Image (tube, helix red, strand yellow):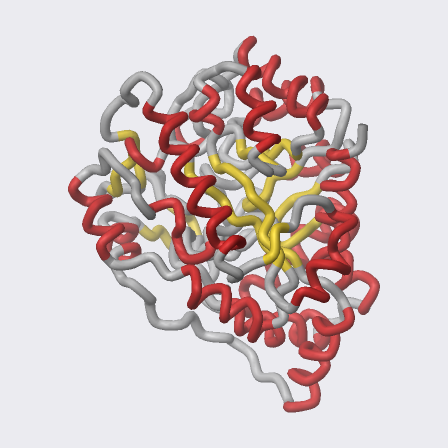
Amino acid sequence: MGKMTRRVLLAGGAAVIATGAYGAYAWRKRPDAAPLGFDLTNEEHARGVAFLKANPAIDAHAHPGRTFLRDASGLSPMMKAYAAKGIFERRTVNDMTEGGLAGASFAAVSDINVLSPTKTGIAESRPFEPGEAWASYKTQITNLKKLASDGLVTPFSAPGDIDMVRASGKPGAIWSVEGADFLEGSSDRLAEAKADGVQSITLMHYRANEISEPMTDSEDDSALSLAGEAIVREMNRLGLLIDLAHMPEKAARRALELSDKPVMFSHTHIKTPELDHPRFISADLAREVAASGGVIGAWPSGIGISDLAGYADRIFTLIDAVGIDHVCMGTDMDGNYKPVFDDYRRLPDLTGLLLKRGMGETEAAKFLGGNLLRVWGQSAAE
């Protein structure tokens, strides 16, 4: 999920204060579509459609239809109002099918019960009750798996299943969890998560947990705890893909040092002199992730960009920084802040634009799905 914080966002030299912006945006059931910012000919759009039929596109991080809010308990009054705006998995899955998306992360949100939107972003509003985080996780993973039993999606439990998933005619659903709060610091619970079909866990979200502090609340010097180190090692052993999005840099570097398998930052961008935001990571850290064989998810949050063309710029900036083999698509769909890629039906437009701007078809296949499949496969390997 995206966030604006107390810090000032510097975009092109102009200071933009986001006071109240998150709440005003998030409360809208389906905000107005972000502008494209470019034109495609019919032939260029058709090329995007044809490419997606021939090559799988997979979203590394998403919350399709906001399943994380279904049956949620103990929500703050403002989060209850957010939930009351609706849960809409079927609509988003239909968008996936229409847009040619092969599969996506369907992410639970481990700390959703204790979060609340504020004037400056999202923050913990109360502590968890004992056992509450685990119970919330079990509710969410049950609801996610019901999407498959109801015939809406096809479970996507291994990268080698991609052909089977595409042949099913239904989007592939990769079960994942954003925030390891549900573990309550115990690596022993990872085996049950694995048995539940979870493929990836984002260690941090918006609450300081037993692993570290979220990057938006730290000054990048928060360490990885001993419990966090044990969780990293056990995720490696079990073949769970480690996601370091939302983790401060010191803790992330320690996780990188410990992990003997590639990791990902599923949805972020790199800091630049023109655009420095606490949800972004340094170029040096991005290069360290790439050097370890990992992948960075290009994140279309409306921080410093205002249209889909800006997202394409962001993708090329990441590729220039870490190389084409280490960038994937991580949209945070249905949980993002002012997204400029806000509807999977626009995937052919984005694909057509990338090709129009000179991305080769081999490179586009890596970005849209190949890189994520590779890292996921390496993570899952025994």
Question: Quadrant of residue 360 in the image?
Answer: bottom right
Quadrant placement of the N terminus: top left
Residue 293, position as x, y percentages in the image: 78, 37
Residue 337, position as x, y percentages in the image: 39, 53
From this view, report whether residue 37 is shown above or below residue 183.
below
Residue 11, position as x, y percentages in the image: 44, 54
**Which residue occupies 49% across, 44% down?**
107
Q: Nearer the viewer, residue 277 or 107?
A: 107
> Horizontally, is 220 left or right of 116 in the view?
right
Residue 368, position as x, y percentages in the image: 69, 59
**Which residue occupies 40% across, 26% down?**
134
How many marks overall? 0
**Residue situated furthest top in the rendering:** 226
Question: Quadrant of residue 208 in the image?
Answer: top left
Question: Quadrant of residue 218 in the image?
Answer: top left
**Residue situated furthest left in the rendering:** 77
Quadrant placement of the C terminus: top right
**Residue situated furthest right in the rendering:** 362
Q: Nearer the viewer, residue 348 or 111?
A: 111
Viewer can see residue 27: yes
**Residue situated furthest bottom in the rendering:** 42
Viewer can see residue 12: no
